[in-house]
Image (tube, rainbow, N blue to C red):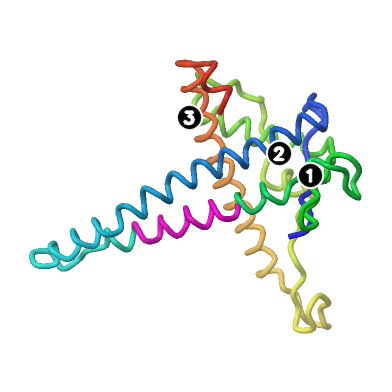
Amino acid sequence: MDEIILVFPDSVTHTIPEVRDEFIAQITRTKRRAAKESAISTFLLPVTLIIDTFAAVIWPFGGLFEIDAVWCYAATKGWYTSRKMTKRLGVRESRFKEYGGTERDLFLRFHQDADLEVLRQYIAEACHKKNPSMFDSVGVPPTETEVAKATGWKPVVRGKTGGKREEGETGWADEEWQRVVFADDLKAVADKAARSWEHWGKKFEKKPDKALKR
């Protein structure tokens, strides 16, 4: 990866340096959390292996070790990726002027787009559905189709010849399948974002100063 493009709606009032600092802070928090989970899951590997070994005597269906191994792999990979990114993001000037990275040609580019407000409203409504008492409703929420249009997503034309169909080829079933998958992925991401915001909001209600530092 040579470049990261950060696209944000017009409702964001922060300056580009502030957006950049927040992005790097989020990666840093991800790195710390992934490092902690990687250490815990690695420590539990021999424990879960022993449990599965002894449990097999009375219960042939184990699985604790496999689950912990997957968790360990995901956490370690996340830690490695975030660590690599933070090392490559510098503070000197780049070909995108003064806010890009410098190490190993990883650059940051910022783009403010009014159409992204549709995505913000979609996620805001997901937060409201998750916890109505904590998050206000945006009114009539945008549909998955409206979000797809606003973000520039559209199905890929996949005919026998590649990106161009021959006479007689329709591909409507394939394109409809892509739309369904996009909608499902969008809902899953919005739901995950809503859970994350609700979790942070509860922490903020208890300890505002501590929550703002995370």
State the separation of the CA atoms marked 3 and 2.
Answer: 21 Å
Three-letter residue code for mark 3: His
In the picture of the structure, the residue carrying the numbered disc 2 is 119
The quadrant of the image that shows the C terminus is: top right
Contact (Cβ within 8 Å) of mark 2 with mark 1: yes
State the separation of the CA atoms marked 2 and 1.
Answer: 8 Å
* Residue 174 in the image: above or below residue 143: below
Tell me residue 80's x, y (percent): 56, 55
In the picture of the structure, the residue carrying the numbered disc 1 is 150
* Residue 190 in the image: above or below residue 56: above
Depth check: give the residue in front, 113 or 49.
Answer: 49
Task: First in sequence, mark 2 or 1: give its number.
Answer: 2
Depth check: give the residue in front, 101 or 3.
Answer: 101
Q: Quadrant of residue 106?
A: bottom right
In the picture of the structure, the residue carrying the numbered disc 3 is 199
The residue shown at (72%, 51%) is 88
Task: First in sequence, mark 1 or 3: give its number.
Answer: 1
Q: Quick check: is 189 in the magenta stretch?
A: no
Contact (Cβ within 8 Å) of mark 3 with mark 2: no
The reply, left or right, for residue 35 in relation to residue 157 is left
The reply, left or right, for residue 172 in relation to residue 50 is right
Image: magenta residue range: 68-81
Three-letter residue code for mark 2: Leu
Tell me residue 81's x, y (percent): 60, 55
